[in-house]
Each structure stands twice: as C-alpha cells, then as structure tokens.
Amino acid sequence: MSLTLAIRSLFTNGHSNEWLVVKFAQTGDKKLFELLYDNCADDLYHFLVTQSDIHLAKDISQKTWLTVFEKPQLYRESGRFSAWLFTIARNKLLDEFRRTNRWQSMTDDIQNKQKIPFAYTDTIEDVFNTSLMTLPFEQREAFCLQQEGFGLQEIANITRSGVETVKSRIRYAKNSLREQLEKYHD
C-alpha cells in the first residue's frame, strides 16, 4: 500500500469511495463529500487538463463535483465511483465543446502543433506533453483514462465505445507517441 493510500485510509476509516458516495447519498453528510473530493479531485483535474486547457479543466471539474454533490443518488453501486465521476466529467466536457464549437478549433490546434518541431531545449516531459496534445481527442482520451488506472471495459463504458475500439485507440495513441518521442531522441 502506498503512503498516500495509507494516509487516505486513516481519514476515511478504510472506507472506499463507493461506500462514501452511497453514505453521502443516504445522509447528506458534507464530511463524506469532502472525503470523496479529497480522494478524487486531483485525478479528475489531471485527466481534464489533458483533454482541454487549464481554465476549462477547472470549470468542468467544478461542474462535475457540483453534480456529484447535488445528485449522489444517481451513482450505481455496480461500478467504481471514479468511473462514474469521470463519465460525468467527460459528458460535461463534450457538452462544452459542442456549445462553444471547440471541436473545430481543437482539430486546427492539433494540425498546427504537429507542424512545430521540438526544440533542443525541450525536456522529454515537454515533448511527451506536446505529443500527447497532438493526438486526436478519442485516442488521447482513451490513453489518458488508461493512465488514470481504468480498465478497458471501464474506458469503454466511460466513452460509450466498444472494448475493441478502445483497444485500437490506445494502440494508435501509443504508436503515435512512440514515433514522436523517437523523433525527439534522434
């Protein structure tokens, strides 16, 4: 068990996020919500910032947590809380993209970023992050969800895609990232 998990379990009395959200839905105890937030907020924000920009990630994160706070009874005990949380966030992000016509600007941004050569002063982390942002949205999303610890079936549920589609998106993302990093290395 990692130190972070050990510390979290001290404050949650060893209860899972799933238990916390169910009890929060039953009791409305704000302390339970705060524990959920403390356990999951950083991971959610990290995922959102890989899918959009910092400002939109903060906005979508807040809207997602507001939904969890207002409608915890919508959580179904058959799945992980984090999968439900990320599904809410993804839906809110896509709604925002549609509302502001960001799909087109994202495509333009990707095409422009692919044309920018890496400078010799870029760190490998900078190159990786830039390469990650050049991936098509669906590939980046599937790859980042996998990096957040979700399994293929959970990613398929979150993205409303088939498992084979998710596998393909992750494979294409990894191949593209490998190619970009090899260009940097050469």
Image (cartoon, rainbow, N blue to C red):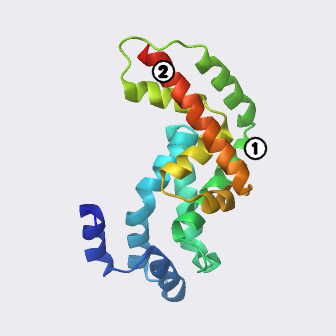
Q: Is residue 103 above or below residue 24?
A: above
Q: Secondary structure at mark 1?
A: helix
Quarter of the figure that contains the N terminus? bottom left
Q: Position of residue 172 (x, y in %)?
A: 64, 36
Q: Is residue 169 left or right of residue 63?
A: right
The label nearer to you, 2 versus 1, is 2
Q: Is residue 113 above or below residue 39?
A: above
Q: Residue at x 48, y 21 (%)?
A: 182
Q: Residue at x 30, y 74 (%)?
A: 9
**Can see residue 88?**
no
Q: Residue at x 60, y 56 (%)?
A: 89
If you read the primary sequence from the N terminus, does the residue marked by circle 2 or circle 1 appear first? 1
Amino acid at dot 1 = Arg
Q: Are marks 2 and 1 in contact (CB under 8 Å)?
A: no
106 or 96: nearer the viewer: 106
Mark 2, Cα crowd under 10 Å, few <14 / some 14-19 / many 20+, is few
Amino acid at dot 2 = Glu
Which residue is disc 1 drawn over?
98
Q: Position of residue 140 (x, y in %)?
A: 60, 40
| Quadrant of residue 151 within the rendered picture | bottom right
50 or 79: nearer the viewer: 79
Quarter of the figure that contains the C terminus? top left
Q: Position of residue 31 (x, y in %)?
A: 38, 77
Which residue is disc 2 drawn over?
182
| Quadrant of residue 126 within the rendered picture | top left
Mark 2–mark 1 Cα distance, whole angstroms, equals 35 Å
| Quadrant of residue 35 within the rendered picture | bottom left
Q: Residue at x 49, y 88 (%)?
A: 27
